[in-house]
Image (cartoon, rainbow, N blue to C red):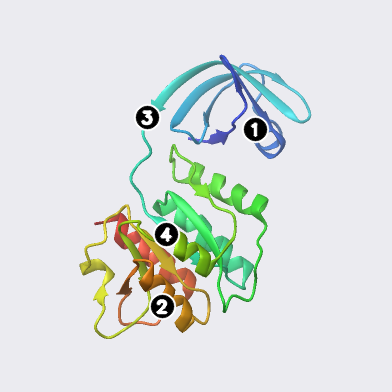
């Protein structure tokens, strides 16, 4: 099933614009009268009929909800140091959404070699991954935040974990972390001692991710997979 995404709804009508409209009308060559399926990223999938097609818009009518998830599923939150390599960063985002994540929190850590990312492009990747995996809710994407203030802001939150190897740590798969936990992954080069200390003081518990030394993006995917299977 080919899915489209829009947030432009008005009563029983909806509009596809820009990339979604181009893909619908020019790439897939849908025409007036065709029925397509779309997501709103807020828990609903619709069937709709194409009413009009123009250069930059596809107008839809006769919307019918065919699948609905009224409450957001309980999924992990992933906070991660922004990666230097943009391809690896985008891969992490894409796979995180496909596996299942409720919120992505990009952090500018002390050892991060980048402090910014292209938010518009990241959101497009998230939408594509949501459609690919047929999920009804689009995860939240937080603004880039500095690591230490963000850790401190999490003080008092339950079920927060930081991936930082120590021989006596629990393994994540044997820890008490739930599939709705907050997981903190460092950048290339890992966290500094100050960041680790701040995380501990803010209530984060340390866990190991196994015996292998993992790339930052791999650690994020392993964490989400383990948490979603608890």
| First in residue order: circle 4 vs circle 3 | 3
Q: Which is in the foreground here, disc 4 or disc 3?
A: 4
Q: Are marks 1 and 2 in contact (CB under 8 Å)?
A: no
**Secondary structure under the numbered disc 4 in the rendered image:** loop
Q: Nearer the viewer, residue 152 or 230?
A: 152
Q: Find numbered disc 1 in the image and state the secondary structure of the residue it sits on.
A: helix
Tell me whether circle 4 and circle 1 mark residues in contact (CB < 8 Å). Answer: no
Compared with 105, 189 (above or below) is: below
| SS for dot 2 | helix
Measuring from the top left, give residue 141's x and y in whole percent: 54, 50
- Could you tell which of marks 1 and 3 lies nearer the N-terminus? 1
Instruction: Determine which residue is flagged by label 1.
Output: 24
Whichever of labels 1 and 2 marks the residue nearer the N terminus, that label is 1
The residue that label 4 is drawn on is 154
> How far apart in space, not on screen, are marks 4 and 3 (Cα)?
27 Å
The circle drawn on residue 197 is: 2
Mark 4 Cα within 10 Å, few/some/many (few <14, many 20+)? some
Question: Do tag 4 and tag 3 residues touch (Cβ < 8 Å)?
Answer: no
The residue pinned by badge 3 equals 70
């Amino acid at each position: 099933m080919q899915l489209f995404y829009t947030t432009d709804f008005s009563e029983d009508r909806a509009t596809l614009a820009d990339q979604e409209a181009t893909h619908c009308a020019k790439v897939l060559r849908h025409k007036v009268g065709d029925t397509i399926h779309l997501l709103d990223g807020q828990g609903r999938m619709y069937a709709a009929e194409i009413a009009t097609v123009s250069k930059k818009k596809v107008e839809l009518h006769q919307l019918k909800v065919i699948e609905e998830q009224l409450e957001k599923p309980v999924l992990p939150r992933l906070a991660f140091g922004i990666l230097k390599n943009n391809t690896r960063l985008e891969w992490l985002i894409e796979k995180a959404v496909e596996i299942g994540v409720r919120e992505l929190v990009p952090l500018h850590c002390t050892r991060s070699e980048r402090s910014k990312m292209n938010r518009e492009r990241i959101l497009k990747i998230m939408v594509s991954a949501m459609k690919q995996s047929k999920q009804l809710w689009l995860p939240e994407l937080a603004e880039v935040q500095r690591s230490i203030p963000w850790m401190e802001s999490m003080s008092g939150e339950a079920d927060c974990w930081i991936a930082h190897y120590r021989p006596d740590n629990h393994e994540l798969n044997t820890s008490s972390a739930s599939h709705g936990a907050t997981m903190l992954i460092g950048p290339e080069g890992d966290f500094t001692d100050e960041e680790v200390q701040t995380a501990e003081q803010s209530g984060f518990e340390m866990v190991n991710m196994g015996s292998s030394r993992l790339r930052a993006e791999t650690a994020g995917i392993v964490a989400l997979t383990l948490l979603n299977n608890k």
